[in-house]
Image (spheres, grey):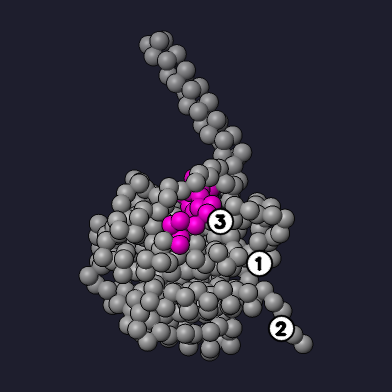
Amino acid sequence: MRKTVIRGFFLLISLLTCSSARTVAAAQESDGQILSSKVRSPLPAYESLDDFGRGYFPRTAYEEARTQTQFDILNITYVSDGFHVPGLLIRPKAIGTRKWPAIIFNRGGNGDLGSIRDNGQPCVGMNTSCLDVADLYLIAKAGFIVIASDYRYQSATLKRDEWGGVEIDDVLNLVPALKSLNFVDPERIYMLGLSRGGTMTYLAIKRGVPIKAAAVIGGVTDVKAWVDSRPEMNLVNGNEYIDGFRNIWPDYEHRAEEEYRARSAVYWADQINVPVLILHSRTDRMVPVTQALRMAEALQEKNKTYALHIYERDGHPLPTNREDRNRMIIDWFNNAATPPSK
């Protein structure tokens, strides 16, 4: 009996020591701290893309991004609420002495769907990270640092993605990450969201993220209406990418409406206090254009600063109008940084 007690005593000491070590390690890490950065593997050759990828990018634009030598494209890991979250950083190789404006990019999808990290897999099917990286380079080359989060739901937890829940902190904590870089101008930080990333953008603004302006492409602004329009995705009960809102959100049976509205910017447009550029396609089959129209109407009612541009025919991320899309976004950000003349 005595040996058992002693053994239990030493086990308790061991557990306390391990717990103390974790506490010390956590105390040494702070939100936004960039723990690691590594040059991303080169983008795959254009010929290796599938039909979707080749349709998404013309060869010349993709090859420019693949062969460019002016920017470092880095896989990063940073701290958010104690989690080590993967992300992406695009920065010029020749930083110089100037302070660079920065864009926080909020990706679409959930869990691994829409992931931007380099997982070593071919860039085909649902794994479209190389297309996102090429797209972000084409924006960065206009003179921006770009940073993005892959959100905290990875590996064993990837199907527990709350879709606008606690992982919004992973977006907010990119601000201190940027401010820790001495070549970033903290007064010129902007935000760009795509699809679900549009929802994240509006939520970040609601939480008071210190940005000068935002742009949203194909953004979801009324989550319940969007889910109802895409029943084949079965986001409520779950699919191969997510366990389902019913199984993730607390007390779904009684609080579902509360959770939907909390993620739906059309219901709290009064809290959108930065200029927002809304871009959408009239023929978007992923997110109906009504999501953009309703958001613009809500912002109009609250006398907020916004611009709305609907393309007549294009895909969800507006690939056909990529050059015009990027020009509008860059002009929107640059104009927001320049005070109007008196």
Residue 269: where, in percent of width, then height? Answer: 52, 80
Query: Of 235 and 327, which appears nearest the observer?
Result: 327
Query: Of 57 and 47, which appears nearest the observer?
Result: 47
Question: Is residue 314 shown above or below 9?
Answer: below
Query: Spatial distance from mark 3 to mark 2, Cα to Cα?
Result: 32 Å
The residue wearing badge 3 is 70
- Dot 1 amino acid type: Arg
- Dot 2 amino acid type: Pro
Residue 18: where, in percent of width, then height? Answer: 50, 28
The residue wearing badge 2 is 340
The answer to which of marks 3 and 1 sits earlier in the sequence is 3
Question: Is residue 221 shown above or below 160?
Answer: below
Callout in the foreground (3, 1):
3
Query: Spatial distance from mark 1 to mark 2, Cα to Cα?
Result: 16 Å
Label 2: state its secondary structure. loop
Q: Which residues are magenta?
A: 64-89
* Pointer 3 local density, CA inside 10 Å: few below 14, some 14–19, many at least 20: few
Query: Spatial distance from mark 3 to mark 1, Cα to Cα?
Result: 22 Å
Location of the N terminus by quadrant is: top left
* Pointer 2 local density, CA inside 10 Å: few below 14, some 14–19, many at least 20: few
Residue drawn at x 38%, y 76% is: 320
- Dot 3 amino acid type: Gln
Callout in the foreground (3, 2):
3
